[in-house]
Image (spheres, rainbow, N blue to C red):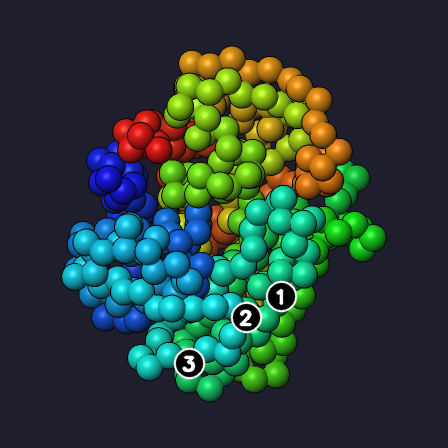
Amino acid sequence: MTVLDSKLYNDDLQKAVSSLDMSKMQDKSILVTGGLGLICSTIVDLLIVANRVKNLNVRIYLAARNKRRFDDKYQQYQDQGVCFVEYDALKTVKFNFNIDYIICGAGVASPDKYVSEPVETMLSNMTGVKNILEYAKCNKVKRVIYISSSEIYGKKQTDDRFTEGVYGTIDLDSIRSSYAIAKQASELLCKSFTSEYGVDTVIARPGHIFGPTASKMDRRISSDFVFKAAHSIPLEMKSSGLQKRSYCYSVDAAAAILMVLLEGCSGEAYNICTKEVLTIREMAEICAQTGKIPLTYVKPTEQEISSFNPMNNSSLAFNKLSELGFHQIFTAKEGLEHTVEILKQLGE
């Protein structure tokens, strides 16, 4: 049983599809790198449902390294427009098919690896997007959307939400910054290809995304907590939990990213978030209540502390995304509850 077998998940995807004008994608082809990850696999799922509901006839090329994982999830959907493309972000890309749009979402995205594998973290992001942009330049791709991160904003002193174009500071002496700096450099590379070569690029900056498409090995706290809640495992906080975050259900994030791809202004960046701001503790309390499990505090190890996100307030402004016409479909609470319920249904 896969996540696409969940009626609740399919219902959520159909709500997202019905909220979008996807007519520009009719009979087009789209390449999704990192297509087995939390965000991009939700995008692929949404496109599969859109093909079924709206008869879009979109050809979906899912670019990833793990063919077995693709087969486990998508083999039965290959007659619905999705096919596997073997892909390594560190290698020059050569595709023997036409591509209209590219969603560039491959790269290391696990906080423990930012510290243990900082070289791989940087290169998988920077080299990967460079290779995609070179391909787009030479092959008349209509548009590339790069999936960046809210971590590019760094730390700030105020309680205001991060607005596109206003930045804090990033500690260059911290190995943990490998991820944020790689994302910053990749964003500027996109803008540079747009400025110098006319490659049409847009940038998506997701906040803290969660959903049932996360890997069981995902160590980000929201993913870890929803999996534990689904399995009735007590939750342990390893900080005060007062840090502010823009938590966003992966289905909302996928819909927002597709809207930016289709309607965003070339060279511009857009926060991918919802209107709400929750603390980590509030997110944890929703997970605990949904899973009917206790929530306690334990002291973190030094190694765990080294991988913590340094941003006490990484809440994102919703205005620019809203001005494109995006409307939030699910509250963070609804998304967390749905994620736990879907994982329970799957026995994941």
Task: Tell me the residue that label 3 is attached to.
Answer: 94
Mark 2 near mark 1, Cβ–Cβ under 8 Å?
yes
Label 3 to label 1: alpha-carbon separation: 19 Å
As drawn, is 188 to the left or to the right of 218?
right
Task: Tell me the residue that label 1 is attached to.
Answer: 123
Q: Residues within 10 Å of mark 2 (few under 14, many from 20)?
A: some
Q: Residues within 10 Å of mark 3 (few under 14, many from 20)?
A: few
Where is residue 39? Give x, y as percent: 44, 50
Q: Of helix, strand and loop, which one carries label 1?
A: helix
Residue extending furthest toward the front: 68
Task: Tell me the residue that label 2 is attached to.
Answer: 90
Q: Nearer the viewer, residue 144 or 83?
A: 83
**In which quadrant will I find the C terminus?**
top left
Residue drawn at x 64%, y 17% as measured from the top left: 297
Q: Of helix, strand and loop, which one carries label 2?
A: loop
Check the image and report above or below for 213 versus 144: above
Residue drawn at x 49%, y 83% as measured from the top left: 137
Check the image and report above or below for 142 versus 247: below
As drawn, is 19 to the left or to the right of 312?
left
Disc on the earlier residue, 3 or 1: 3
Q: Nearer the viewer, residue 42 or 77?
A: 77
Q: Of helix, strand and loop, which one carries label 3?
A: loop
Label 2 to label 1: alpha-carbon separation: 7 Å
The three-letter code of the residue at mark 2 reads Leu
Residue drawn at x 19%, y 54% as measured from the top left: 76
Where is residue 313? Give x, y as percent: 68, 37
The three-letter code of the residue at mark 3 reads Lys
